[in-house]
Structure formats: structure tokens, C-alpha cells
Image (cartoon, grey):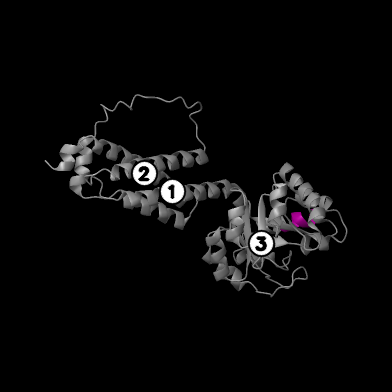
């Protein structure tokens, strides 16, 4: 009989139970990242941790199985009152993340015991445990944003202060919402922030009251102050990575891009959607006209909603949708109409045909 067999017969029960807990929790989290979020990097991270800790040769695993005594385990019949047994997906992710973290901590301590029972070092287990803290945060962030992300479709109406030409933000936004829009963005390049804040707050409250997403353009501080659902940034603004670190877990972030490389970089940094444009000539933005081909390429390259922007109207939105757009962002097509409500409804109906 080896030293490990004679010196630590019960330790194998600890290892077996901890490895099982870690593997079960990791599998649930991996499936969540893979099938619900379609997140390849998170899936690969979780799979790598699972493969790293479930290691060792057959004699080692045979000892673990032989040490198993489920019927004689005193912990089997210990019940903890948990109140409501129904779980949300978010709470299940938290529970399984903690399960893995605790199991890794136990294995980490066992790996330090003299005799070398575990085939993986305490240093590797510690690294995996710390990686799990970040993975838990990323999973929760993605899940909490999922419902908002799924609303990025159809009409994306941009309330541009200059394009309003003195009209009321709240009145025009109200008309657009009555027309069926489910996304409102406030874009303002001129108003001082102290004056912009009450406008943003009023729009945010209006959108929340109607179940509509409110997205702030450029200004993260204003978005945070009014509890906006999202932030939209351009290539010259705060980076997606920096914005993600500062934003709440449930705030979605969109990014304007001009090509596939920028789109991939934005998504890798944490963008929930990308906006491609200008597709057609527009007076609202001083930017190059890209045409439809970059839109097609970006749609094929990323697994997030793709918003088309720039010169889109009733006459050309069909070809924009055919090119892959999940949503169309418009300013003039709505704000320039005699009835923003009617214009919004017509755009939505045409896009859904």
C-alpha cells in the first residue's frame, strides 16, 4: 500500500466530493455560456478550467471512486432552509459559481498536504479559483444585459438636439414611442452637461414608463446619473473596454464601427451591439459613406445585433434589411417628418414586412 493510500484514506473522499462539485458547477456554467449566450471565449475559459482540474490517471480516479460512500455520508441528510426553491437563471449562475469556487478552495488546501495526492498543484488551483471570480462577473453581466440586447431590433430612433430645431425632446420622443419605437437614443453635441442632465432624466423616465430602451450617446457620466439602459460610443470616444469597466453590469454598450476589424474589436471588448454607417449620404453626421457591403461583412463577422445608420428612409430600408441589419437607426426620417409618430409607424411596418 502506498503512502497516499495508507496515510490519507479519507482525504480521497474530500477530493472526490470537491472534484464532483466543481465539475458539475463548471458544466452548468459552460452550457450557459455556450447555449444561452453564444459566448465562445467564456465557453473556452470554463472548458479549460474543467479539463485542468479533472486530471490524473486511472489509478488515481479508481481510488477516488473506491473511497466514495454516498450512503454513509453524514452530509446527505442535512437540509438547509432556502425559502423559495424556484431559481432564476441569474441566481443559478451565482450558486454554481460559488459552488465551483468553494470546491477549488478545498482542493487547493488538499494540494498543499505533504504526500502529493492531487495530480494538480495548489498554484494552478488557486489560479483557476481567481479566474472563476472574473468569469462569474462576466457571466452575470452578460445575462443581466441579455433582455435589453434582444430589444435591439427594428426602429432605433435618435433624438438629435440640433435636428429638433427648437422642438421639445419629450414631446417628440413621446410621438415616436406612440408610433411603436422601442429604442430611443439622446444625441447632443452642443448642450452643456448641466442643462443636458434634466433633458436626459426626463427622457429616461419616459422610456422606463413605456418599456422602451433609453440609450445615451457619448456621455457615460450622464448615462450613469439618469440610470440609462445603455450607452452608445464612437471610435473617437471612450473605449468600449473602459466604458464596460465603469458601467453597471446591466448597462448595454453599443459602438459605431466602419469595418469588420473594428466590429470584432468592439465585441471582444464587451460591446452588446455595433452600428455600421453611414450606409447612405446623410446631413446628420459628417462621415464617409460606406454603402451596403461593409454592413453585410460585419453582420457575417459578429454574433451581436447590427444596427445600420446613415441616410436610411422608407425608400431604401428594404435593401438595408436584406444586407443583414437587425435594426435601423434614423434621425431625419423621423425628426424631419410632419408627424414623427406616423413616420415611426411607417418605418416599423415597412421593416417588419
For this orientation, the residue located farthest to the right is 166
> Mark 2 falls on what kind of element?
helix
Circle 2 sits on which residue? 104
Task: Determine the residue positioned at 76% across, 49% down.
Answer: 177
Q: Is residue 336 visible?
A: no
Q: Secondary structure at mark 3?
A: strand
- The residue wearing badge 3 is 233
The residue under label 1 is 132
Q: Which mark is residue 36?
A: none
Secondary structure of the residue carrying numbered label 1: helix
Q: Residue furthest left?
A: 1
Q: CA distance from mark 2 to mark 3?
A: 39 Å
Say if residue 46 shows up in the picture. yes
Which stretch is magenta?
A: 341-347
Image height check: is 296 above or below 14?
A: below
Disc 1 vs disc 2: Cβ atoms closer than 8 Å? Answer: yes
Disc 3 crowd rating (10 Å Cα; few below 14, some 14-19, many 20+) is many
Left or right: 101, with 149 as reference point: left
**Label located before the other in sequence (2 or 3):** 2
Rendered residue at 44%/43% (across/down): 97
With respect to residue 285, does 127 lie above or below? above
Residue at figure coordinates x 84%, y 50% from the top left: 171
Furthest-front residue in view?
114
Earlier in the chain: of badge 1 and badge 2, it is 2
Q: Nearer the viewer, residue 135 or 279?
A: 135
| Nearer mark to the viewer, of 3 and 1 | 1
Amino acid at each position: 500500500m502506498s503512502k497516499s493510500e495508507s496515510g490519507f484514506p479519507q482525504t480521497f473522499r474530500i477530493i472526490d466530493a470537491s472534484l464532483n462539485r466543481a465539475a458539475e458547477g463548471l458544466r452548468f456554467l459552460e452550457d450557459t455560456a455556450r447555449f444561452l449566450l453564444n459566448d465562445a471565449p467564456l465557453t473556452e475559459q470554463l472548458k479549460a478550467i474543467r479539463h485542468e482540474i479533472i486530471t490524473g490517471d486511472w489509478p488515481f480516479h479508481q481510488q477516488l471512486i473506491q473511497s466514495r460512500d454516498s450512503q454513509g455520508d453524514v452530509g446527505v441528510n442535512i437540509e438547509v432552509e432556502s425559502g423559495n426553491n424556484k431559481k432564476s437563471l441569474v441566481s443559478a449562475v451565482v450558486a454554481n459559481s460559488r459552488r465551483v469556487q468553494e470546491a477549488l478552495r478545498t482542493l487547493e488546501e488538499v494540494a498543499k498536504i505533504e504526500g502529493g495526492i492531487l495530480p494538480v498543484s495548489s498554484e494552478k488551483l488557486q489560479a483557476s479559483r481567481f479566474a472563476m471570480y472574473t468569469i462569474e462577473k462576466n457571466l452575470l453581466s452578460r445575462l443581466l444585459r441579455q433582455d435589453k440586447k434582444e430589444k435591439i431590433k427594428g426602429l432605433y430612433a435618435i433624438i438629435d438636439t440640433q435636428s429638433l430645431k427648437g422642438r421639445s425632446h419629450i414631446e417628440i420622443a413621446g410621438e415616436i414611442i406612440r408610433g411603436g419605437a422601442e429604442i430611443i437614443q439622446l444625441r447632443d453635441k452642443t448642450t452643456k452637461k448641466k442643462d443636458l442632465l434634466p433633458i436626459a432624466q426626463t427622457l429616461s423616465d419616459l422610456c422606463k414608463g413605456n418599456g422602451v430602451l433609453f440609450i445615451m450617446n457619448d456621455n457615460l457620466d450622464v448615462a450613469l446619473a439618469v440610470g440609462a439602459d445603455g450607452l452608445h460610443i464612437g471610435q473617437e470616444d471612450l473605449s468600449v473596454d473602459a466604458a464596460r469597466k465603469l458601467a453597471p453590469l446591466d448597462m448595454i454598450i453599443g459602438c459605431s464601427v466602419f469595418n469588420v476589424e473594428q466590429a470584432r474589436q468592439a465585441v471582444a471588448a464587451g460591446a452588446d451591439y455595433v452600428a455600421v454607417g453611414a450606409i447612405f449620404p446623410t446631413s446628420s453626421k459628417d462621415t464617409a459613406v460606406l454603402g451596403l457591403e461593409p454592413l453585410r461583412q460585419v453582420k457575417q463577422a459578429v454574433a451581436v445585433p447590427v444596427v445600420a445608420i446613415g441616410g436610411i428612409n422608407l425608400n431604401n430600408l428594404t435593401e438595408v434589411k436584406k444586407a443583414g441589419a437587425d435594426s435601423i437607426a434614423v434621425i431625419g426620417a423621423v425628426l424631419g417628418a410632419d408627424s414623427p409618430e406616423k413616420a415611426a409607424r411607417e418605418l416599423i411596418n415597412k421593416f417588419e414586412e
